[in-house]
Image: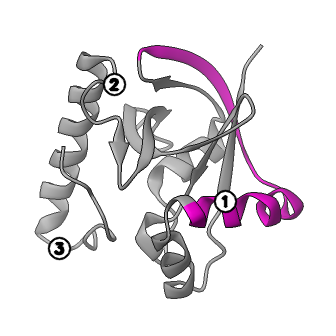
Amino acid sequence: MPELRGKPPPPESPLWKLWNALTRAHALAYRVSGGTIGARNAGMPILLLDHIGRRSEKRRTSPLQYMPDGDDLVIVASKGGSPKHPAWWLNLREAPSTTVQVRRERRAVVARQASPEEKTRLWPALVNLYAPYADYQARTSRDIPVVILTRAH
C-alpha cells in the first residue's frame, strides 16, 4: 500500500470518492491479511478502527496511524488539518465503545479524548513519529483531538 501522506481531498472534490475507495481497499487488505498488508504508513503503525455512523448507523472501518502508550492506543483526529473533525471521531464521541484490529489481534476498546495534560505529554511524541501532525495543527484553527483507546474490560 502506498503511503497516504498529506491531507485528504475536500469532500466536494471528485477525488473524494477515490480517497474513500482507497481507504476501503486498505482496510480490506489489512483485515484479510491480518495486518501483513497495510500495517504501516509513513513509518507509523496502522490499526483498523471500527465505528458506527452516527446518522447512517452503518458499520464503518477506518485505517488509522497510532502510537502505543502502555496498553493504550493513541490516535489523532487530524483529518489532514481540515477545519472539520473526521467522521470517525464524531462517531466515537456518540458511541465510544468499539473494536480495533492491530495486526491479527482484535480488541474491544473505549475511546476518549485526551485531557489537556495528557495531550501535552502525548503530542510531542506523536509529532516526533509523524511530523506532518504539526503542519496539520498549524493549518487549522480547531484544536486537533488526541484520542486514547483503552482496552475494555
Other residues around mark 2 within 10 Å, as few (<14) / some (14–19) / many (≥20): many
Q: Is residue 61 above or below residue 66?
A: above
Identify the element where label 1 is drawn: helix
Q: Amino acid at mark 3?
A: Ser
Residue denoted by label 1: 125
Percent position of residue 74, x then y: 64, 45
Picture quarter containing residue 64? Answer: top left
Identify the element where label 2 is drawn: loop
Identify the element where label 3 is drawn: loop
Judged by depth in the image, the label closer to the viewer, 1 or 2, is 1
Percent position of residue 2, x then y: 18, 51
Residue range (magenta): 104-128
Q: Quadrant of the C terminus?
A: top right
Q: Is residue 141 above or below residue 42?
A: below
Other residues around mark 3 within 10 Å, as few (<14) / some (14–19) / many (≥20): few
Spatial distance from mark 1 to mark 2, Cα to Cα?
Answer: 24 Å
| Observer-nearest of 124 and 102 | 124
Say whether marks 2 and 3 touch (CB < 8 Å).
no
Say whether marks 1 and 2 touch (CB < 8 Å).
no
Name the disc covering residue 35, or none.
2
Q: Is residue 67 above or below residue 119?
A: above
Apparent side of residue 87 relative to residue 122 in the rendered image (left or right): left
- Looking at the image, which residue is at 16% across and 46% down? 21
Name the disc covering residue 13, or none.
3
Picture quarter containing residue 143? Answer: bottom right
Q: Amino acid at mark 1?
A: Ala
Judged by depth in the image, the label closer to the viewer, 2 or 3, is 2
Q: Quadrant of the N terminus?
A: top left
Apparent side of residue 5 relative to residue 129 in the rendered image (left or right): left
Q: Amino acid at mark 2?
A: Gly
